[in-house]
Amino acid sequence: MENGGGDVPENANDHCPGTQSESAGKADACAGCPNQQICATAPKGPDPDLLAIIERMNTVKHKILVLSGKGGVGKSTFSAQLSFALAEMDYQVGLLDIDICGPSIPKMLGLEGQDIHQSNLGWSPVYVESNLGVMSIGFMLPNPDDAVIWRGPRKNGLIKQFLKDVDWGEIDYLVVDAPPGTSDEHISIVQYLQIAGIDGAIIVTTPQQVSLIDVKKEINFCKKVGVPVLGVVENMSGLRQAFSDMKFVKPSEAGETDATEWALNYIKEKAPELLSVVACSEVFDSSKGGAEKMCQEMEVPFLGKVPMDPQLCKAAEEGRSCFIDQKCSASAPALKSIIKKLVKTQ
C-alpha cells in the first residue's frame, strides 16, 4: 500500500494522505475509506495547547473513558458509582463530565448549584470528598434548565480547556464520562488524552440487540483510534427488587387500584418467608446472548452484569454512593465486583 505521511490507519485506502494532513478525509483517495468522516472532522496539525495538556495530565496516573453506543443505558450512573467506589478505596479520584449538552454528573454526585472557583493554578474541581473532585459544564450554567446549543468546535474548545486548565493535583484515577455515540467530543478527548497516555475505555450497554448494535460501533471506533477497550458492562441486566419493596395493584375495567397494603399484609400472614425473597424479571430481551456473547464475538473483555435496581436509581437521583449502606443489595455487589476486576488490571 502506498500512503502519504505518518499516522496512517491500517485499514486506510491506497495513497492515504495521513490523519494529520490538511486533506485528511477530503482528498480523492479518501473516498469510501471507513475512516473518512473521523479524519475529516478531527483537528489537524500541531496544537500549541498539547504541551499544556501533557503537563497537566502528568499528575494523573490512570485515565479511563466511560462510553456508550446509545443514550439511556446508565453510563453516567456507572461513571458516578465507579468514582464513588474508587474514592472509598482510598484512591485520589477526578470525574470529568464532557457530556456538554446533557451534563447529569453534578446531580448524580449531589453537587447541583455548585460553582467553579479559579486560582493561580487553574480551575478548581468541585469536591464531594477530599479525594473526589468533579468538573462539568453543569457548574457553569446560570440556570440548570438552559440548553447548550453549541457546534463541534466550541464543544472541542471546552474539552481542551477542561484538560489543560483544571487543577486536579496528584490523582490516581481520572474518570471521563462521555456522551453517547462517536461524535466530535469523542474524537477530541481521544486525541488530547492519547498524547498523555490513556488506559482505555469502559463501554456500558443494556442486554437487548437495539443497544448492542450501537455498542459494536463504539468498539470499532475504539479500535480505529487506538483506544484499548478495558471491558464492557451489561447494565440493567434484569430487574431485581426485594419482594417487600414491590407495589401491587388490582386491575379492573375502571382502572387500577392500589393493593400494596392488602397484599403485603396477606403475605405477612400467609407466607412471611416471601418478604425476604428478591423478585427477578428479564426486562430486556437477552435471548441472543446479550453483551457477554457480543464480547466473545468481538474479542473484548466482558466485565460483568449489573441488574436494574430501583434502589440504585434512587441513589443516583439523590446524588449519593450506593456502597455506603445495604439499600442497594442487588446492584452494589455486582458493581463492586466489576470495579475490583478493573482495578486489578490497572
Image: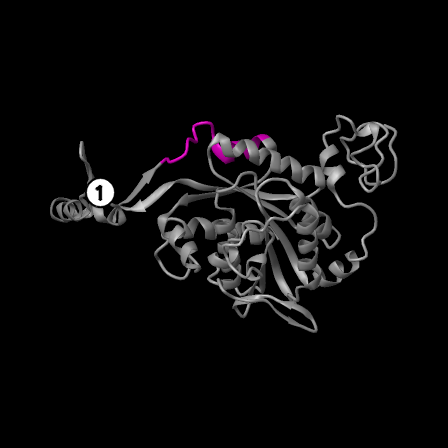
Closer-to-camera residue (186/85): 186
Q: Is residue 158 left or right of residue 45?
A: left
Q: Residue 113 appears at what percent x and percent y?
A: 49, 64
Quadrant assignment, res 296 = top right
**Compared to 126, does 316 lie above or below?**
above
Measured as percent of width and height from the top left, residue 162 is found at 66, 59
Q: Is residue 43 magenta?
A: no
Instruction: Identify the residue position indicated by label 1 in the image.
Output: 248
The local secondary structure at tag 1 comes to loop
Could you tell me the amino acid type at mark 1? Phe
Q: Please tell me whether residue 226 is drawn above or below residue 324 in the rendered image.
A: above
Name of the residue lying farthest toward the left: 269
Q: Judge from the rendering whether residue 75 lies leftward or rightward of residue 25; answer left or right.
A: left
Q: Which residue shows up at 57% across the image and 53% down it?
A: 344
Mark 1 surroundings within 10 Å by alpha-carbon count, few (fewer than 14), some (14 through 19), many (20 or more): some
Image check: 275 left or right of 142?
left
Q: From the viewer's perspective, is residue 27 above or below residue 94?
A: above
- Residue sitting at x 56%, y 34%: 214
Towards the viewer: 237 or 346: 237
Specify whether 104 is left or right of 269: right
Residue at left offset 54%, top offset 70%: 130
Q: Is residue 289 magenta?
A: yes
Magenta stretch: give its range.
282-297
